[in-house]
Structure formats: structure tokens, C-alpha cells
Amino acid sequence: MIAPQRSATTKAKPGYVKIMRTCEIARENYNLPYVWVDTCCINKDSSAILSEAINSMYRWYKDSWICLVYLSDVTDSQLSFHQARWFTRGWTLQELIAPTDLVFFDREWEFRGTKKTMATHVSMITGIPSQILDHSVDLSEIPVAQRFAWASTRETTREEDGAYSLLGLFDINMAMLYGEGPKAFIRLQEHILSEGADTSLFLWSDLRTSQEFTGLLAPSAACFREMRSITAEPSFTQREIYLTNRGIRLKLGLAWDATTGLAILPVKHSFGTSGKPAGVYLRRVGLDTFVRARPNECVVADSKRFYNILTAVKCLSSSQSKRIVNNAMSIIAAREVSIMQVEPPGSWDSSSQLFYGTHTSAFIGYMAFQKSRFPQFAVILFFQDNHWSAIVEQGERWTSIQATFYSYYNYNRDDLKYHDSMGDQRLAYIKGPHSTALTVYLRIKESTGRPYIEIKTFDEIASNPSSGAI
């Protein structure tokens, strides 16, 4: 098993002593004929061999007779063990979880204990439940978000390895594409979605992002840091999740925040000991398209939900997020003018008085208004190629259009004749009782060049006293 002679050059190489001591311990302590050592048993010059090794590594550790862990920075103190660099590396997570029997050795190759005897200490260091370490609970029973949380503070030399090192934890096989950067973690999440319907995958918070909106998938495992104690809610129905070219297709119930117009996506998991149902915020940016809103926080999901079929964007770049923010239409209405309906729901944020369009393709929607003793009217808004068009419909004509709104404007888009490139324009003059009226303008804000809608009350006599009765 061990060659009788090695050159001085070979013996001076990093890892040589580790290989020698591993072979000696395997033979003397366990009477094993073979060992596998990560230092030398992967040919990294061959992409095929490397890919096979990475996809098989978890199984190799799981099927091993014994797994030896050499902690090169650990001395004889207990504090040193807790601070071992091995507990901070990405690749060692599966080395810790997969084997049934695992033995720790310190810098001097002194025995420090086994995974079973030190389970309490190891659990405290890593945040991994002892039931996972001793295999009394199957890994598949743990929510996806919680498994990612175990890796959230671990580091890898290459960005892609942050995803590749976790394949075994999710029983996933996928190709190694070094050079793809953050796309590796997105691909891993896509594979997880294709294998099951654990929506805790969407339960994450990114404290480092400056984006107001993101996709539904997390950029890295670090975003799951706070999800170590989530629990799955009992469910008697299987959620349907589809990956499409447009994003993630979901069929589920959404809750709504009345103030901001944000949707709340419930993920069928609860926050730790509080037992409160967890969810994340979504912003509608199209007829059935949503993006993640407030990606730096999660939220308690309301129990009152409305069934929806929706598509959530998987990933959203910083420029796309800014486009959604910058293209939102401000709508300023007189206080006595009430909003009766918004279509599509979730497009209107009453706290900031913004109507959200989209970052791609085209978007159409409306806001219906009412003022006492005035005919009901609606502002129809169309967004395409970074520009807004608008028109106002009122009274019986609006009532007849509203019932078939989308199909009507699909064939009559030319009706939306007022365009933000035309400068300030009056969209409507709506007569009320006596000398009162409402005016609706599409205006351009001088400081930003962005369009906004202004709805004001108007009194003909007050504005023109000479025309009043004598």
C-alpha cells in the first residue's frame, strides 16, 4: 500500500505527511487496504474526472468505512478546536455530514474525538442539528433553506464552488462550468426546484444588495444565514412549480399589503419557535409577472390569501431593478378623488403614489377613480420601450370598456394617443355639478424628465369671476 522509498523532493511536497499518516492509520487502526485522499486523488487537469469526482464525492464520504479529518491548525486546547479553519470551508460541509463514522486529528496527529462523541460541540460550532450529524434524521427531511443556512458562513476559493460543494446535500448532479461565476448558484437552485416543491428555497434575505427589486432566487448561500431554525408547515396538497423561459411559474395563494400594494408569497414554512408563517414580498410588474421586492427582509405571511397563477422572475440585474423604479408612474390625485380599482392588482403603491409598469416588453393597466356627484372615470396607462402613453375614459363608455379591458385595448391600442414624448397634455376635462370640474393631465417633471399624472378639481366661476352671474 505504501511505496518503500520516496525522493526528498516528494517528501517535501505539501500534503505528503498527511497522505503518509492517513495510510498508516488506515492500515494499523482499521486494517483497510485502500484510502482516498482529496490531496492527490482528483485529477483537476481533466474536466470529466473533476466533474465525476465532485458529483460523486458526497456518496463516497457516505459509503466510506471511516473518514479521517486532519485539523492542521488545531493544538491541544479545546478553544483551538472550536476555531479550526476546517469548520469555515465550503467543501468540508459535506465531509462533516455524509460519513457515518468520522474521526478528528489535531496538528500533531493526536486523536481528538469522533463526530458522535463530539456531536454537541460540533453542532454548536456549525449550527447543524446533532440529529443530522448522527443520521437519526434524514437530510431530505430538512427544509432547503435550512440546509443552505449551514453553508451561509462558509467560504470557497472559487465562486462556483459555493454551489458545487453543496450538490450532495441536495442529491443533485449537474455539470461543472468553471467561469460561470454566480450563475452556478442559480443553476443549483433550478435543479433543486426541478426535483421537488420545497418553497423554503424562496425564503432568504440579502443584506448586501442595493437593489430595490431582485429575482426570486438567491444570489448565494449567504442569503440564508437567518434560516437555521425554520420549520415546515403541515401540507396536504403539493404545490405546482414550473421552470419556464420567463421565470418560475407558481400556482398558489397570495396575501396583499394594502398600503404598498406588495404581494406576499407564503412559503409554507414558519419562523422558528414563534410559529408565525413566513413569506417574502413581491412586486407586480406585468399582467402575471412578479419580482422580489424588499430583498433584504422576510415577512410574516397573512392567513387571508387569494389564489393566483403567477410567474416570478428568477434573476434581476441591478440595471433592470433601477428600470422598474425609474419607470414607475407617479399619480397625484386631489384628496376628494377616491381610487375605486387598480388593474392589475399590486401595481399601485399608495404609500409612494407610484404605479409600476414593467422592465421588459409592454404593460397595460388602469386606475379607476370616483368623486362624489361626478361620473366614474379611469386613467388607462400603457408602457412600452421606456415610454408611457395614456388616455382617460369616463361614464358609460368606461363601463362598457372595463368588462373586456384587455381584449379591447389589444385591438384598439391606437386609442392611447397621449404620449409622454409630447410634453404636458390635458387628458380629460370631466364636468361635475354646477361649475365644478375635474382635469386630468399627463405632465413631465422638469427636474427628472419623468412623466406623471395629475388629477385636480376645478371651479369655472372661481377661476374666471367675470363669467359669473350678476
Image (spheres, grey):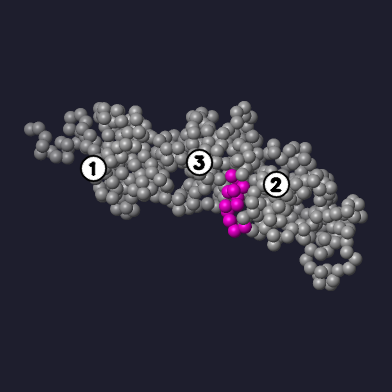
- The disc, 3 or 1, on the residue closer to the chain's N-terminal end is 3
Q: Which residues are magenta?
A: 178-190
* Magenta region includes residue 451: no
Q: Which label sits in the foreground, 3 or 1?
A: 3
Distance CA(mark 3)–CA(mark 1): 36 Å
Distance CA(mark 2)–CA(mark 3): 27 Å
Type of the residue with mark 3: Ala
Q: Residues within 10 Å of mark 1 (few under 14, many from 20)?
A: some
Within the image, what quadrant is residue 287 found in? top left
Quickly name the residue at label 1.
Answer: 426
Type of the residue with mark 2: Gly
Q: Position of residue 242 (x, y in %)?
A: 55, 38
Question: In terms of secondary structure, what is the magenta stretch mainly?
Answer: helix
Quickly name the residue at label 2.
Answer: 168
Check the picture and name the quadrant holding the C terminus. top left
Type of the residue with mark 1: Arg
- In the current view of this chain or complex, which residue is farthest to the bottom? 8
From the viewer's perspective, tell me whether residue 337 is left or right of residue 280. left
Within the image, what quadrant is residue 47 found in? bottom right
Q: Position of residue 273 (x, y in %)?
A: 65, 35
Q: Position of residue 303 (x, y in %)?
A: 54, 29
Residue at position x 67%, y 45% in the image: 172
Quickly name the residue at label 3.
Answer: 312
Q: Position of residue 347 (x, y in %)?
A: 41, 39
Between 443 and 139, the residue placed more toward the observer is 139
